[in-house]
Each structure stands twice: as structure tokens, then as C-alpha cells.
Amino acid sequence: MKLNKEYKEITRDIINNEYFTALKNDTHHGTNRYDHCKRVSYLSFLMTKLLRGKSEDAAKAGLLHDFFFGNTANIEANSYLNHPKTSAINAKKYFSINDFEAEIIETHMYHYALVKKALPFINHDDKVIAKDYKPKSKEGYIVCISDLLVSIFELGFFKVRYSFCLYLIFIINIIRY
Ligand SMILES: [Fe+2]
Ligand SMILES: [Fe+2]
């Protein structure tokens, strides 16, 4: 309860901001980007508490790690590799974040950079230098790992469930007619 209260105080200004709430309109992993950012932020906050890190910086950077507008497809600034920079620019424009928090945002896709390095045939048009995305702090690694864990959960829970429901409706319709 005490942690919940502390988290709400740290993030209140961002969570209620009109530009941040606009993320509710953007689909992300079968859910919306507003909820995704909140999940990553809260998990990062708890992990930094556990590991004695800078929990306020992690909570704020976690909230703003995907702070970009519109879809990821067809918009260069929102691509897998470019959206961390875009999000950091937006975060600085709309909120007073420090350089440490901006750097956490800019390096949160290190997990993707490592996967790309190991499996270069995935999105092969994207050229990546993994060390450019390497977090420079414990909090940077925590937000990166939180993003990965939350994304896996969301893709499994929302996307697979959504596809399963569609298939079910399809099969029920075949049986009925
Ligand atoms: Fe991201
Ligand atoms: Fe994310």
C-alpha cells in the first residue's frame, strides 16, 4: 500500500497529462500504449525498489519509454530502432525529465538489438549496432527487462486470446451454417 501511494505520487503528473493519455488511442501488443507504459513503469519501480536502484527515475522513464504517437508501421521515427530516440525527444518536450531518465528511454530496446544481432534475418532492413542501445545504468537494464517481460505477457494474453476468439467465432459460424 505504501509503495502504491509512493508510485502514484511520482507518476501523477505524467499519468494525468493530456499528451500522455493520448496514448490510449494507439494499439500496442493487442492492448494500448498507455496501459503498456504503465505496466512497464510499475514493474520497473518495484524491481528498482527490490534492487535498491533509483526507483523514481525508473518509474518515470518506464512510463515514457514508448511515448510516441501513431502506429509503428510506415512511420520511420516510430520504428523498432528509432522510437526510443523519438520517445526521449517527446519526453523532454512535454515533461521535465533529466538526462539520466532520457538515457534509460533511449536504451530500452537493447533486448531487440540483441535479438537482431543473433538473428539478423528478422526485419533484415533494420541495421543495428547493439552497443548503441546498451544501457549505461542498472535502472536502464531494469526498464529494458521490464519492457521485455510485459511485452511477452501482453502478446500472449491479449493478442493470442484475441486471435483465439476470432477463430472460435469463425468455427461456430461454420458449424451453424
Ligand atoms: Fe519500445
Ligand atoms: Fe515498450
Image (tube, rainbow, N blue to C red):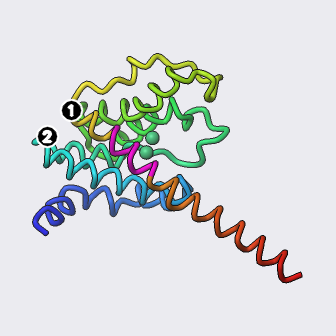
Label 2, on which residue? Answer: 53
Q: Residue at x 39, y 52 (%)?
A: 37
Q: Are marks 1 and 2 in contact (CB under 8 Å)?
A: yes
The image quadrant that residue 174 belongs to is bottom right
- The prevailing secondary structure element of the residues shown in magenta is helix
Seen as rendered, the residue at the extreme right is 177
Where's ligand 2: which quadrant? top left
The x, y position of residue 14, in whole percent, is 31, 56
Q: Residue at x 46, y 16 (%)?
A: 129
Q: Residues within 10 Å of mark 2 (few under 14, many from 20)?
A: some
Range covered by the magenta-colored residues: 144-152
The number of numbered discs placed on residues in the rendered structure image is 2
Q: Is residue 11 left or right of residue 149?
A: left
Seen as rendered, the residue at the extreme bottom is 176
Amino acid at dot 1: Lys
The x, y position of residue 67, in whole percent, is 43, 46
Q: Is residue 150 magenta?
A: yes
Q: Residues within 10 Å of mark 1 (few under 14, many from 20)?
A: some
Q: Residue at x 50, y 22 (%)?
A: 118
Q: Is residue 111 magenta?
A: no
